Image: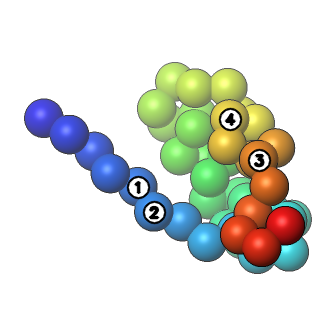
Amino acid sequence: SRLIVSVAIDNLGKGAAGQAIQNANLISGLMETTGLSALGIGQ
């Protein structure tokens, strides 16, 4: 099986999108900051 996740990070991940990614990481057993330190689109 395969899981594909697409997200939009608002204001460098400081808002609700960043929180959602952090929660998804915890549920998936990943480190809380996985995917949050990467640069967003256009940066």
Q: Is residue 7 left or right of residue 21?
A: left
Mark closest to the chain's N terminus, 1 or 4: 1
Nearer to the camera, 21 or 9:
9
Residue found at x 71% / y 58%: 19
Nearer to the camera, 9 or 21:
9
- Whole-number angstrom distance, CA of label 3 to CA of label 1: 15 Å
For the residues labelled 3 and 1, say whether their Cβ atoms are less than 8 Å apart. Answer: no
What's the residue type where badge 1 is placed? Val
For the residues labelled 2 and 1, say whether their Cβ atoms are less than 8 Å apart. Answer: yes
Secondary structure, mark 1, is loop
- Whole-number angstrom distance, CA of label 2 to CA of label 3: 14 Å
In the rendered image, the quadrant that contains the C terminus is: bottom right
Within-10-Å neighbours for mark 2: few <14, some 14–19, many 20+ = few
Nearer to the camera, 3 or 38:
38
Q: Which residue lies under the disc numbered 4?
A: 34
Q: Which residue lies under the disc numbered 3?
A: 38
